[in-house]
Amino acid sequence: MLVFATETSCDETSICLMEDQKIIDHIIFSQEIHKAHGGVVPELASRSHLEKLQEITEKIFKINEIKAEDIDIFAATCGPGLIGSLLVGSTYTKSLALSAEKPFVPMNHLEGHLLSTSFNNYIVYPSLVLLLTGGHTQIYLMQSSNQIRLLGESVDDAIGEAFDKTAKLLGLGYPGGLEIEKRAKIGDENFFVLPMPLTKEKNFNFSFSGIKTYINLLIKKNKVDDIFINNLSASFQKTVSEIIITKIKTGLIILKEKGIVINSISVVGGVSNNKYIRKKIEDFVDKDNIELYYPLKEMMSDNAAMIAWACIKNYNKEKNDIYFKPQPRMKINEKL
């Protein structure tokens, strides 16, 4: 089965050509234009998708010597995400499917992330999946590739959003995650003691906005120089990692009390690229003898390869729907 998939939920324009479990071609275009604004500007994102989709498609078709009629299934992210960006990507992909008289499958962006680790790993279920991105911080229970249940999520900022906002407060560039991680390497992670919201609550939910508020107060009370920025970046990164580990521990206890023993943990999404956070999670699972999975590097951030793979992994003819409308707040259990 040859799948042509597009991903345009935010500020990455990505197209993947995948056959069964082999990536034939995969292109991700990251929109640099947002750096000047310190965050994603929805209108600019939509316009950039419009400009790049046809260009990338022509490149992939030419390099691989194929045409639209050779594709078996066309798939596109239809939510969640920025509505303008979703409309551009899904409409473009639908037009290709219609012209080639082939099926169109609307895909859930979150499902793409959650299934990304199964592309390069044999997942031992039940599995606890931690989704860490700029727009979502969530914990899922996966009993199989199509039995997915949301257990908890951030009640305010997503983890990636917290990195970006903290970086902006410190006068660092965008995206903030890379800048914070870079500064943290030369800072003292024990210099500041930051709040850890909801970590004493016995549930699966996260909260990060309180940390940002506390950091704002520290900035007003201190001289903001390189030493301050480095130490605060390191302390922030450590605190966020401790929140994640605490929530994993709490989650495992809650599930065990319900008779569910977790055999593996998957960490997916762009923030899973953070080496410090990865090391902390790896240290934890080593002690508990739990399998730990990550996606391929090219499938960590927003990308079309995970969309193509999710389509192949859980495809059935009932999912064909050329009339499906993009849903910016689509949930993982939303029926497609």
Image: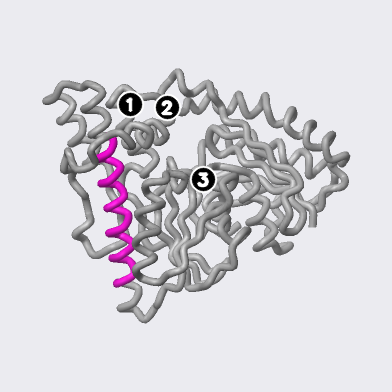
Instruction: State whether the magenta stretch is mostly helix, strand or loop.
Output: helix
Give SS at disc 1.
helix
Quadrant for the C terminus in the image: bottom right
What residue is pinned by disc 2? 174
3 or 2: tag closer to the N-terminus: 3
Check the image and report above or below for 153 versus 290: above
From mark 3 to mark 1, how far is it between C-alphas?
25 Å
Q: Earlier in the sequence, mark 3 or mark 1?
A: 3
Which label's residue is closer to the chain start, 2 or 1?
1
**Which residues, given as a range, are shown in magenta?**
233-253
- Residue shown at 42%/27% (left/top)? 174
Q: Residue at x 70, y 31 (%)?
A: 53
Q: Position of residue 176 (x, y in %)?
A: 39, 32
- Could you tell me residue 116's position as x and y percent? 57, 55
Disc 3 marks a residue whose amino acid type is Pro
Left or right of 199 in this view: 69: right
Q: Is residue 220 above or below residue 334?
A: above
Q: Quadrant of residue 94?
A: top right
Tell me which amino acid carries mark 1: Lys
**Residue behind mark 1:** 168
Secondary structure at badge 2 equals loop
Q: Is residue 149 visible?
A: no
Give the residue pinned by disc 3. Answer: 80
Q: Nearer the viewer, mark 3 or mark 2?
A: 2
- CB under 8 Å between discs 2 and 1: yes
